[in-house]
Each structure stands twice: as structure tokens, then as C-alpha cells.
Image (cartoon, grey):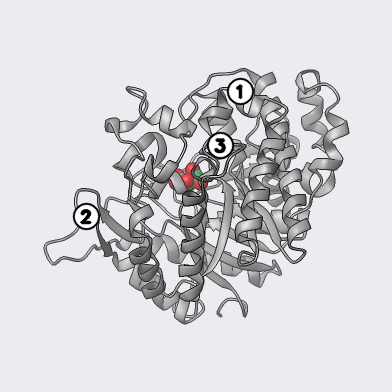
């Protein structure tokens, strides 16, 4: 069986991870520029200063996308390239870059899916308190306004935020991503609340400009996979996915319930009420700007069974279970069960906005890049996504992470997630075997995938 008619096949990347040109043509700095230059912060002292030099090579990169046959490309915008201080004067040269990029994509029949914020917060606004400042949602709305005015005539698909749990959890609480802060739970939940307000205000700005806009976030979070098809294990996995019992920013529904239903998860609020910003309830109508589709970034899930009194219990993987080069577990069924649970709860078409793996790829003596693990990984995950569809879930798209190898945050250039191999010394691009495999998957709308 193939995928639904009109299914969107794409690939994704993010501004700081590929663009480079960090000081080109008036771009202002972001927290990632600051953090990446901090000694010891990034593996091997790597940074995104040059990255894939996409800022100068975007035309060549769009041609690679075309060769693969992508229907869509998920990109993010560098806020400080457009607004060097985060608010105030516009850097026209920065805005023109995105203008040209969008035109280039459309001229090649590739639909842009634009993420407004993929972690590169303007440094000047960080000095004013960053996401801790209650004004941050107004700053974000101003940025959104500048962007939709310039690009909204051609861009219909938007994501306000990428993985808010990750930049809050790793960037502001764990200190291993920019800005490298190690704040406490009250600050973490304050940041999360402001980020949600920013989503709400930006969504209103986008919709006021374009009523047919399709808006989401690229969400991620804890996802349970039932170890068996018994009703009890399925219920345990559902609970594992949605029970906000710990004061944690890592639950998917901590971020999604307020947007979709206008309330925070009740058990979650019980756990954190005393540390929430005063009067947070009054902001819920602003936050309650429901999505048009559900954007989900998925790499792995947790195997769960019903333990004592049906309580969810996480099962460790058997010894020797497959892992990627990043040592992330390979759990293909998450692409069946994650969409099932999220569709059940939110009733929105599911778009996988990221999925893929870091693999140990290099250019072989024959000049090609052989990455059979990526092909197998993609086959297994996509096969499970198809099973979700067969079980009645509305699925609308899949974006492979990533179109090309790039700067993997704290890991620098160590990890290769691309369909296209990048030699960072010469900037030579080489399509990997998986890129050709994906080309056939796209051309057959999934029919070329193995059945299992
Ligand atoms: C994330 C980001 C991407 C990563 C990718 C691989 O999920 O962390 O959205 O920017 O590069 O997920 O880790």
C-alpha cells in the first residue's frame, strides 16, 4: 500500500545549522554565536560560522533538493539576520536572502515550510532577559510581523517554534545548548509560558495576514510504545505519553494542551502550580491558538508495559539492541504509536517534521557515499508511519532530517544526519545512497518501500 494522495515528501534543516555567513551583510548575533565561541562548549571547538555555507550556496542546494524530487523543504529563519537587534531596524539584505531562497524553492516546485524559531535567539534580546522577560512574546510577534509581510504572499506553511522542550530543557536548564544557562524549575516554567504566549501572538499575526495559513510547531517529547498489543499495554503507553506527573518540560502535551485546548494538563499543573508565573491563567486565551496540523519531530520512543495496577513501566531495550552513531535507540514503532496517540488526542493531520539518524558516513573510494543503515532506518520508520495511516490516523507529510550534513549543536560537525554528504573543507556535496533511495520512495509515493 502506498501513502495517502497528496502526501508531502520533504526534508528539513535549520538556519544556524547550515547557513554560515554569521556576520555577512549586517546579520546580528544570536545566542548560538555566543555559545559556540565559548571554549569547551562545542565538540572540537566547531561552530556555525561557516557550517555548510548555505547562505552563499543556496542555489546549488535547491538543485540537490530538486534532484531528490522533494515536494517541500522545511527551513528556519535566523531572527537576527533579519532584525540584528531582535526588534527595531530591519536588515534588508538579510530579509532579501530569504526572499531569494523562497523564490528559488518555488521556481523549482518545492513548497517552503518555514519555522520562525529554531533556537537562534537574538543576542541583544538575551541581554534584556531573553525568554525570561515577559516582553519576549511581543518581540517575537514583531519579528513574525516583519516576516509575514515580506514572505507571507508565498509561504503558507508555518511553524512558530522548533522543539520548545529542547531549547528550554537543554539550553536554559541543562546548560548544554545555547545560551548555556542552568536555571531552576521556576525559571524553566516561566520561559515555557512565555514561549507559548509567543506562539499565540505570532499565530494571530500570521492569520491576520493570511487566513489560509497552516500553522503548527515542530513538537517533540516523551512518546510511549506498547510492548504488546494488549489493551493494558496500549493504555500504559498512552499514559506514559501524556501523564505529566513530574515537574518536567519534556512532556509533549505540556506544550500542546494549552495551544489546542486552552488549558495546561491538570496533573501537571498540580505538580508546578506554586512555581508558575503569577496570573498565568489570564494568558491562556492568548496561548490558545490551535494548530492546523500537528508537526512532530521523532527519533525514538520508550517501550512501555502495564506494571502494577496498570501503571506505565518503561522496559529497557534488550542487550545489543540497534543504536545509531549518536547512540540513540532505533525504535521504528514510535512512528506508528506516536501519531496514533497524538491523533486520538488532538484530531489533527500528522506531519513528521523531523526523523532520521546520525550515521558514520564517508565518501568511499568509488566516490559514492554508502549508507545502508539510513536506508533501512527510513524503511522501518516509514513502514510504521504507513501502519498508523492504515489504522485510521490522518497523515499528511514526512520531512527527513536532514537534507544535508550540518552543525549538530553541542556535537559540532561530529554527527552526519544528511541525505547529502558535505565535505566541510571543500564544501563539496555528494548525494548519499539514501538520497537516491528516497528519490524512488517519493516518486512512487511510498510504494517502493519494503512491506513488512
Ligand atoms: C533537534 C533539532 C535538530 C537536530 C536534530 C538531530 O531535534 O534537536 O530540531 O536541529 O539537529 O533533531 O538532533
Q: Secondary structure at mark 1?
A: loop
Real-space CA distance between mark 3 and mark 1, rounded to the nearest whole angstrom: 22 Å
Q: Secondary structure at mark 2?
A: loop
Front-most of residues 268 and 147: 147
**Which x, y percent locates residue 10?**
50, 66
Question: Residue, x 71% and y 44% (percent of image)?
Answer: 199
Q: Residues within 10 Å of mark 2 (few under 14, many from 20)?
A: some
Q: Classify residue 57 as left or right of residue 218.
A: left
In the picture of the structure, the residue carrying the numbered disc 2 is 362
**Is residue 200 visible to the viewer in this orientation of the structure?**
yes
Q: Classify residue 446 as left or right of residue 371.
A: right
On-image quarter of the N terminus: bottom right
Front-most of residues 77 and 386: 77
Say which label, 1 or 2, has the lower sequence index.
1
Q: Is mark 3 within 8 Å of ligand 1?
A: yes
Q: Residues within 10 Å of mark 3 (few under 14, many from 20)?
A: some
Question: Residue, x 71% and y 40% (percent of image)?
Answer: 198
**Which x, y percent locates residue 269?**
80, 29
Task: For marks 3 and 1, give the one nearer the viewer.
Answer: 1
Real-space CA distance between mark 1 and mark 2, rounded to the nearest whole angstrom: 43 Å
Q: Classify residue 234 as left or right of residue 331.
A: right
Rendering quarter of residue 83: top right
3 and 2 marks in contact (CB < 8 Å):
no
**Rendered image: mark on residue 166:** 3
Rendering quarter of residue 131: top right
Front-most of residues 373 and 264: 264
Real-space CA distance between mark 3 and mark 2, rounded to the nearest whole angstrom: 29 Å
Amino acid at each position: 500500500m502506498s501513502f495517502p494522495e497528496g502526501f508531502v515528501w520533504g526534508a528539513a534543516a535549520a538556519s544556524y545549522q547550515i547557513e554560515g555567513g554569521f556576520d555577512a551583510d549586517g546579520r546580528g548575533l544570536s545566542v548560538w554565536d555566543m555559545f559556540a565561541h565559548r571554549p569547551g562548549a562545542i565538540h572540537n571547538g566547531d561552530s556555525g560560522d561557516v557550517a555548510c555555507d548555505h547562505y552563499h550556496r543556496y542555489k546549488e542546494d535547491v538543485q540537490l533538493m530538486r534532484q531528490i524530487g522533494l515536494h517541500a523543504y522545511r527551513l528556519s529563519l535566523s531572527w537576527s539576520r533579519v532584525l540584528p537587534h531582535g526588534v527595531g531596524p530591519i536588515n534588508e539584505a538579510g530579509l532579501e536572502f530569504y526572499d531569494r531562497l523562497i523564490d528559488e524553492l518555488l521556481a523549482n516546485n518545492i513548497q517552503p515550510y518555514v519555522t520562525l524559531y529554531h533556537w537562534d535567539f537574538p543576542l541583544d534580546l538575551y541581554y534584556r532577559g531573553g525568554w525570561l522577560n515577559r516582553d519576549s512574546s511581543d518581540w517575537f510577534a514583531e519579528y513574525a510581523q516583519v516576516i509575514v509581510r515580506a514572505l507571507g504572499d508565498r509561504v503558507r506553511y508555518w511553524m512558530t517554534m522548533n522543539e520548545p522542550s529542547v531549547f528550554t530543557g537543554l539550553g536554559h536548564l541543562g546548560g548544554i545548548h545555547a545560551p548555556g544557562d542552568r536555571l531552576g524549575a521556576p525559571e524553566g516554567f516561566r520561559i515555557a509560558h512565555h514561549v507559548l504566549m509567543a506562539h499565540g501572538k505570532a499565530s494571530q499575526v500570521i492569520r491576520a495576514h493570511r487566513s489560509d495559513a497552516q500553522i503548527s510547531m515542530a513538537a517533540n517529547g516523551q512518546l510511549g510504545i506498547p510492548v504488546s498489543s494488549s489493551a493494558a499495554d496500549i493504555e500504559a503507553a498512552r499514559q506514559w505519553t501524556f501523564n505529566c506527573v513530574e515537574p518536567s518540560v519534556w512532556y509533549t502535551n505540556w506544550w500542546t494542551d494549552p495551544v489546542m485546548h486552552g488549558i495546561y494538563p491538570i496533573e501537571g499543573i498540580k505538580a508546578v502550580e506554586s512555581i508558575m508565573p503569577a496570573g498565568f491563567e489570564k494568558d491562556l486565551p492568548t496561548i490558545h491558538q490551535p494548530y492546523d496540523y500537528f508537526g512532530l519531530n521523532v527519533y525514538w520512543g520508550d517501550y512501555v508495559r502495564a506494571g502494577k495496577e496498570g501503571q506505565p513501566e518503561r522496559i529497557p531495550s534488550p542487550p545489543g539492541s540497534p543504536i545509531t552513531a549518536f547512540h540513540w535507540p532505533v525504535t521504528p514503532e514510535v512512528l506508528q504509536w506516536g501519531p496514533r496517540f497524538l491523533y486520538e488526542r488532538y484530531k489533527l493531520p500528522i506531519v513528521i517534521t523531523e526523523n532520521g539518524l546520525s550515521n558514520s558516513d564517508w565518501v568511499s573510494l568509488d566516490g559514492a557515499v554508502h549508507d545502508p543503515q539510513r536506508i533501512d532506518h527510513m524503511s522501518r520508520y516509514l513502514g510504521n508511519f504507513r501502519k498508523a495511516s492504515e489504522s485510521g490516523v490522518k497523515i499528511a507529510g514526512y520531512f527527513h532530517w536532514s537534507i544535508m550534513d550540518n552543525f549538530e549543536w553541542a556535537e559540532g560537525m561530529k554527527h552526519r544526519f544528511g541525505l547529502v554528504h558535505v565535505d566541510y573543507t571543500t564544501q563539496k556535496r555528494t548525494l548519499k545512497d539514501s538520497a537516491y533511495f528516497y528519490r524512488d520512495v517519493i516518486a512512487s509515493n511510498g510504494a517502493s518501500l519494503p512491506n513488512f
